[in-house]
Image (cartoon, grey):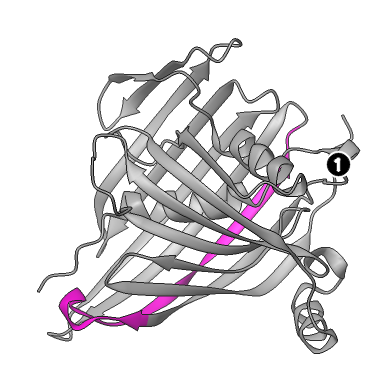
Amino acid sequence: MPIKLRMSSMIAALAAVVLTANPAPLSAAGFETAPHRAVYEFKLKSARRDSGIVDIRGGMTYEIVDACDGWTVNQKIVLGMINRQNRQIRSVTSYSSWESKDGRRFRFNSRTLRNGRLSEQYRGTATLARDGSGGEAVFTRPKLQKMKLARGAIFPTAHSELVMKLAQKGERFVWRVLFDGTTNEGPYGVSAWMGKPRGTGAGDEIKVQQVVGDRLGVGKFWAVKLAFFPSNSRASAPEYALNVAMHPNSVARWLTMDYGNFVIYARLMKMQALAKASC
């Protein structure tokens, strides 16, 4: 059976993870994003036989920068999948976005090469009304296309702020329509389940600190599960789901991406703190 994995789904998953782990500053609540550059390693955690996948290797570099009026995110994802015929599909995706700190303006640009050939490309802008009544996305790649965004739609960083606010209050569930520019087929409906804050054992903290070099990636974190439903789907099961250990300062210490018949595990390998903007 051929491997069934849209790269836009993979990018949406990873964008959601790192952006959902990157709330805008919430000083009153004790949350503050830490601009940083991180490297994650991918491994195949499990796969059913009907997935057609034998192995997955690769990784992601991720950077979030305070641009004063917004957050700039840059990602590069390299993914190699080997099927049962021992053929490898290698994809390289670059994704960048900018979101205003008021959560109303968004720019996005993603490009995927599969085995050296252009496979997907999305570029454009989006805006939301101040009163929450919806908005519009305008794609300039792969073609000019306008897309209405429903009432209550939200961009990634604003979504993360909402998730973290509710988690801090002890709430456990929130549903929103999320637009991140990773596909022109419509935004995703995203359900988020937030666990209780968890501390970690001293041994685990030492291991994490050896990777990150300071205390950016240690201390309490929330176990959050995000389930993604295409906007035009009535299926009861999500297209994919994410489990992520979210620190309130924007560092994701690990995550898993569950596509139903296979699961990818991503481990934090290296991290560098970046200077905060002086605006």
27 vs 207, left or right, is right
Residue under the point 63% across and 25% down: 103
Q: Residue 172, how many percent across, how many down?
A: 62, 50
Kind of residue at disc 1: Ala
* The C terminus sits in image quarter: top right
Residue under the point 38% across and 60% down: 92
Image quadrant in which you'd find residue 272: bottom right
Q: Which of these two is toward me, 138 or 142?
A: 138
Q: Give the range drawn in magenta.
A: 46-67
Element at badge 1?
helix
Q: Which of these two is toward me, 112 or 131?
A: 131
Q: Which of these two is toward me, 80 or 8?
A: 8
Q: Which of these two is toward me, 269 or 94?
A: 269
The residue that disc 1 covers is 29
Residue under the point 70% across and 28% down: 101
* The N terminus sits in image quarter: bottom left
| The magenta stretch spans residue 48 | yes
Q: Residue 132, how many percent across, how many down?
A: 55, 15
Figure check: 229 above or below 98: below
Figure check: 212 above or below 109: below
Residue under the point 34% across and 24% down: 140
